[in-house]
Image: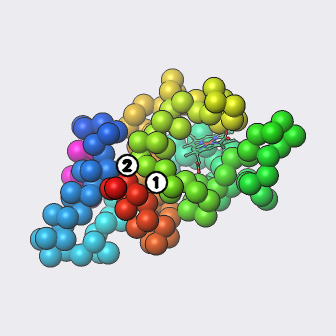
Amino acid sequence: MAVQLLEVKKMGKSMSLKMIVISFALMTMSGITMADQHRNYDSSMLDAGKQLFQAHCAVCHGVLAEGTVENWHLRDENGKFPPPPLNGTAHTWHHSVGSLFNTIKNGTISIGGNMPSWKDRLSDDEVFSVIIWLSSLWPEAIYQAWMERNNS
Ligand code: HEC
């Protein structure tokens, strides 16, 4: 996974998932099964993602992205949704890499939500690292469903 994640950095958000998926195909063809390899993310990117998440996101989304409220479906008194868990138990995996990237960069305040924008605080690489770390937490079935959505 190290090589393809470097490619992700080089190619930018629109190509990222395609590269990952192509890499899976290559690994499968070369006899390494996806199950063995596909979560074998670049460890420096994972570490960076984890640290960035702890520093910037955990306050609202929980240290292990487990969420900080009892019911993330319930709007607050201002009609806004609380921060959902991002650990695979909510619906983060419904969104493509590109869409998660945009949500994190832009936040949701401009569209009536409560999530701050990270545009001026996190670089593209840093946002990708965080997404990679988050997806590393997801159970296998959720992760596979996310890959299929991203690839369709
Ligand atoms: C001040 C609290 C706060 C902080 C800090 C915060 N978020 Fe959020 N986040 C939210 C809220 C609230 C939502 C729900 C969307 C909305 O505003 O309606 C959300 C939604 C999201 C979503 C969409 C989840 C989904 O399932 O659709 C992602 C992804 C996300 N946040 C990632 C991050 C990341 C990564 C960071 C750190 C860089 C971060 N958030 C920091 C409050 C926060």
Figure check: 92 above or below 120? below
Q: Quadrant of ligand 1?
A: top right
Q: Secondary structure at mark 2?
A: helix
Q: Quadrant where the N terminus lies?
A: bottom left
Considering every residue shown, the one lying at the far front of the view is: 152
Image marks 1 and 2: residues in contact by CB distance under 8 Å: yes
Figure check: 143 above or below 130? below
Q: Nearer the viewer, residue 126 or 29?
A: 29
Please give the label number shown on residue 45.
2
Magenta highlight on residue 20: no
Span colored in magenta:
1-8
Q: Secondary structure at mark 1?
A: helix
User: Three-letter amino acid code at disc 1?
Assistant: Trp
Asked if residue 125 can be seen in this view, the reply is yes
Name the side, left or right, on which 89 lies relative to 123. Answer: right
Identified at 40% across, 57% down, the residue is: 149
Q: CA distance from mark 1 to mark 2?
A: 8 Å
Which residue is disc 1 drawn over? 133
**Disc 2 residue: CB within 8 Å of ligand 1:** no
Identified at 24% across, 50% down, the residue is: 19
Residue 127 x/y as whole percent = 45, 39
Considering every residue shown, the one lying at the far right of the view is: 77
Name the side, left or right, on which 17 lies relative to 95. Answer: left
